[in-house]
Amino acid sequence: MNIIVILFPLALGLGLLGLGAFFWCMRSGQFADLEGAAWRVLQDDDAAAPPAEKQAR
Amino acid sequence: MAAQDLSVFVRHRDGGIASMELAVDGIRCAGCMQAIESGLGREPAILGARVNLALKRVSVEWREALLRPEAVVDKLGALGFKAYPFVAERQEDGAVAEERSLMRRLGVAGFASMNIMLLSVAVWAGNSGDIDPTTRDFFHWLSALIALPTAAYAGRPFFESALRALRAGAVNMDVPITIGVVLALVMSVAETWTHGRHAYFDGVVMLLFFLLIGRYLDQLMRRRTRDLAGNLAALKAETGTRLADDGSWTITPIAAIQPGDRVLVRPGERVSVDGIIETGRSELDQSLVTGETAPAAIGQGERVHAGTLNLTGALTIRVEAAGQGTLLDEIDRLMNQAVGSRSRYVHLSDRAARLYAPVVHALAAATFLGWLAWGLAWPEALLIAATVLIITCPCALGLAIPAVQVVAASALFKRKIMLKEGDALERLAEADIAVFDKTGTLTLPEPDILNPEALPAERRAEIGALAAASTHPLAQALARALGATAPRTDVREERGHGLSAGEGGDEQRLGSLAFCDAEAEAASVKAQHPGASLIAYRHGAYRTVLALGQSLRLDARATIDALRAAGLEIAILSGDRAEAVAPIAAALGIAHVQAGLLPADKLNLLDSMAANGRKVLMVGDGLNDAPALAGAHVSLSPVSATHLAQAAADIVFLGDSLAPVSAALGISRKARGLMLQNLWFAVLYNAVAVPIAIAGLATPLVAAVAMSGSSLVVTLNALRARSARSSEAEA
């Protein structure tokens, strides 16, 4: 069962990574407009699109 | 024409970059979003534009040296979108910070409950097999390591709220939650210490997770309504003409006008600020403020209020307040009096909590004492009592109401109805009498020609040009209704009679019936439109009589009928004269009418209705309605309303139609039905789960299944409501 001593911190670490990513998304305002993001995926002219900015928050 | 000055809305950043937030009218879909972003992106001076589709806003960044803010608005106009700048809320705003902190707590609780569940599933599986007690203890300690800091962080909103309630000598839903969480954590640590089989760390953290979701939805709802209120203010796009000391003037958004500024109000313009008249004299149409439609004379040194219409002379006003509005002393006193009665309303969720908390506390205490009497050791008895608290904890209750509110609010938003208070839905659903103001609410704010059939199209221009030459209020109203802007210059005015132009057989006259010798034509018009102001026109042998008055809002009749069909009594309380109110009431078939009321009378009438147990829905728009709007059980106001009325109303609707009133009622009733359904489900759930917990059979596994199951059912119920409602909306 000693493997748990390695596996558990690993699992916890991955989870913390996810939590960190969530906080980062929050800071960069990705949850400010949930409707727009769904449609933005479908735009196919990425090259012409204006650069994403952090203004939205 | 002086340019608009928008510089007050611009935020400046390092490197000469300016940014501005705009509320945009007409963003409907992803196509609009792309059109705006790529359209603005093509402009070299604009660094970036980003559309927020949920809020219908655009934020734009550009190089300050290359572009003026007005040009950004023009660019959007060229793309086909009307944009209105507004002052963006600041990050450090209390509500924004509150929402972010809730979201963070929600993230932490979600993370922790997932990781603890990982350990717990292993323990549950092992408990039914042959788990090594050392491994189990290790897993329990790890769970405690995650759960204790998480509970301390994520549970703070509940702990604080419970403490506040206890200090005030009251009990709210957060008290049993706090007791349950703390007891369960303490007992679980003790259990782990003594190598016990069951620990409830997973249940506690999952409980906090679900409760935080409900709390977050509630907060989201509040922020959303506030954002929409911000858009509303911007969409009104009110401007004033500000005079500088050197005599030059600029058209400035109201938000940029400060107390102490001087503004110019021309004849025919609506006064956009509150202040004292410095120069000029005029007549004011105060119908939006007092409900009275007859004009009032006003001169130097007197006070004018935003929302009044300047009829005859140019005025220079020293601003006392812009935007939010100063108050008549009388209205101010009444507002204070009115707001007190609103605060007596108890939310549905609080009412549930009042029933719920004592029952749960009593049950838990009885369980503890019962098991002690049965001969169980006190730690075990306490653990069982804690599981009773945990399992009865209102996960479903916490989600039931906010979830429905969010769904209903978005359904309302689609119909251009803005909810300003989340609990307005509950209150609106209870309304059993609808009280309408007349001027500006049942009728459109501007007077209109009531008998367009008497006005041949080819004569519109000549009558308009004649009317525009006069400063008489009735002629001004006629000119506005005809859209005439260029007055004839050769017009003679006979005070008290009318206007004339031309000579002999080509003479044109506009004025009183006697002046135009049109009494014969007037008789039938008078019979058709009693209460309207009549104005006659004569050109050679041609004579016609026009009736000027306030026309009904679109769908007013259908809305009143729909409200009646929904079981509401209808009444009109107006500040206008009885003769002006009677035809409107007759047209709508409303019998309960009171006219000539002062603001205090309206409030008193509403109070007496409330004292008789009636739940009053008030619809009004004037400054004189504001106390009544604040004092009513629930209140609606059209977007054309005065600032104060809109601030006092719970719900604001856009457009010229009155139909949103009945639509809002329908949606709110459905929403309330769903909330009650969800609450009953929570009761049912407890009826099953509590006996299991009291019997001491609620293992951590049972608690986890019950909790997540009930929360899921409640959420699904809200989603089911959404699909049902949207299909009904399309029908």
Image: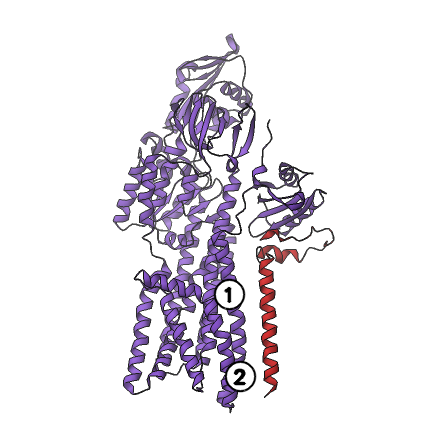
How packed mark 2 is, by other alpha carbons closer than 10 Å (few <14, some 14-19, many 20 or more), is few
| Colour red maps to chain | A
The residue at 58%/64% (across/down) is A22
Colouring rule applied to residues = by chain
Secondary structure of the residue carrying numbered label 2: helix
Residue B199, located in which quarter of the rendered image?
bottom left
| Left or right of B221, for residue B382 | left
- Residue B615 location (% of width, % of height): 32, 50
Dot 2 amino acid type: Ala
- Residue B700 location (% of width, % of height): 45, 80
| Colour purple maps to chain | B
Identify the mark at residue B330; answer none if there is no mark: none
Out of B238 and B372, give the one closest to the viewer.
Answer: B372
Out of B688 and B43, give the one closest to the viewer.
Answer: B43
Out of B515 and B704, give the one closest to the viewer.
Answer: B704
Q: What residue is pinned by disc 2? A: B122
Q: What residue is pinned by disc 1? A: B106
